[in-house]
């Protein structure tokens, strides 16, 4: 007998239903200030989320991340994105996430191909484009180089050189404009942020953001333990890809814990890497305990989503009240 967990994970309706629910969450978040114009202003963010979802479908299909026919990877991605709905208004975070997914899709094509400078160039070109809006993506480059050697087995001088050229190409295109304007300050400030580290200040995070982060990490950690125990059931190629996802997620999770001010950008990357791990766990388990855990996770995710929505609305209400009070005092 199929349990609720498998009915949802193997249903063709799962992704469309989750997409509709996420769209409703987006509408609620964007209209938190009571203005219909906000919906039009937030359309680019919605386009980024839709494009990222499509790329997650391609990432799952092209690399056979699941052994069963399922849309759980993009559905999990959407569910985690809705749960962390405070990220929805962040256009830079959405663009960085889109570029990161594009980089993953292309980079995984280089698996065991040490003569793939073309694919490597395009992968790191996506990362370079993403660094325009979230410069800290560049700090992932050493990790990705290491993963090219250990997980993708695509390490070679030509590939590493192609990755450097790909990273620098977007900046080469803006250099003529910088020289024309004779103003290097924006570019210097852009890269200076890479060396800016401060003591962790968790006061910048809301309870909803912390809850979403902890939920994602805990469920993904359970998924990682399950994957390590049953990895022999997957192909070697798939195991290597999941090793890459796990490595990037663990590094970004630790990084976020140390630098909570980078929540918007890092949480987007964590969601991308955690989605296949969580989807793998729910799609490939079928016990009474896993079904209870799945149902509990759905309830908790819905509760955290509501908490985040209420938190955003409370912030908007507080900001409006402060503006009105300051206006009265000005009289």
Image (spheres, rainbow, N blue to C red):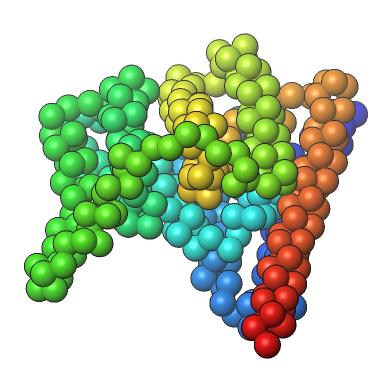
Is 331 situated above or below 72?
below
Task: Give coordinates of residue 127: x percent, y percent.
Answer: 33, 48
- Which quadrant of the structure image shows residue 214? top right
Task: Give coordinates of residue 161: x percent, y percent.
Answer: 14, 37
Task: Give coordinates of residue 14: x percent, y percent.
Answer: 74, 50
- In the image, 49 versus 330, the foreground residue is 330
- In the image, 103 versus 16, the foreground residue is 103
Is any part of residue 163 visible from this angle?
A: yes
Residue at screen point 85% across, 35% down: 295
Task: Give coordinates of residue 103: x percent, y percent.
Answer: 37, 46
In the image: residue 9, left or right of residue 224: right
Residue at screen point 43% across, 37% down: 198
Q: Residue furthest right?
A: 1
Q: Residue furthest bottom?
A: 331
Is 17 situated above or below 164?
below
Residue at screen point 50% across, 57% down: 94
Is any part of residue 35 visible from this angle?
A: no
- In the image, 65 versus 207, the foreground residue is 207
Residue at screen point 49% across, 63% down: 91
Instruction: Say which quadrant the C terminus sits in.
Output: bottom right
């Amino acid at each position: 007998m199929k349990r609720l967990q498998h009915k949802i994970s193997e249903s063709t309706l799962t992704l469309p239903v989750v997409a509709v629910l996420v769209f409703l969450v987006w509408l609620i978040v964007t209209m938190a200030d009571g203005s219909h114009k906000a919906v039009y202003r937030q359309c680019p963010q919605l386009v980024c989320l839709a494009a990222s979802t499509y790329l997650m479908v391609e990432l799952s299909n092209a690399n056979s991340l699941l052994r069963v026919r399922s849309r759980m990877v993009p559905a999990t991605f959407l569910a985690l994105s809705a749960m962390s709905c405070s990220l929805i208004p962040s256009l830079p975070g959405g663009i960085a996430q889109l570029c990161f997914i594009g980089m993953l899709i292309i980079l995984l094509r280089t698996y065991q191909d040490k003569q793939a400078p073309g694919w490597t160039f395009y992968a790191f070109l996506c990362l370079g484009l993403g660094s325009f809006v979230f410069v800290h993506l560049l700090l992932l480059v050493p990790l990705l180089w290491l993963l090219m050697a250990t997980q993708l087995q695509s390490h070679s001088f030509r590939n590493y050189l192609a990755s450097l050229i790909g990273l620098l190409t977007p900046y080469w295109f803006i250099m003529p404009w910088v020289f024309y304007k004779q103003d290097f300050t924006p570019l210097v400030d852009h890269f200076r942020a890479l060396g800016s580290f401060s003591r962790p200040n968790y006061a910048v995070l809301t309870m909803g953001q912390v809850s979403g982060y902890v939920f994602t990490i805990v469920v993904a950690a359970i998924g990682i333990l399950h994957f390590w125990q049953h990895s022999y059931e997957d192909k070697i190629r798939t195991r290597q890809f999941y090793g890459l996802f796990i490595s990037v997620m663990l590094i970004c999770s630790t990084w976020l814990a140390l630098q909570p001010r980078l929540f918007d950008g890092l949480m987007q990357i964590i969601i991308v890497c955690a989605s296949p791990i969580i989807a793998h766990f729910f799609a490939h388990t079928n016990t009474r305990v896993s079904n209870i855990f799945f149902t509990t996770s759905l309830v908790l995710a819905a509760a955290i989503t509501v908490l985040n929505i209420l938190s955003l609305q409370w912030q908007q209400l507080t900001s409006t009240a402060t503006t009105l009070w300051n206006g009265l005092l000005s009289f």
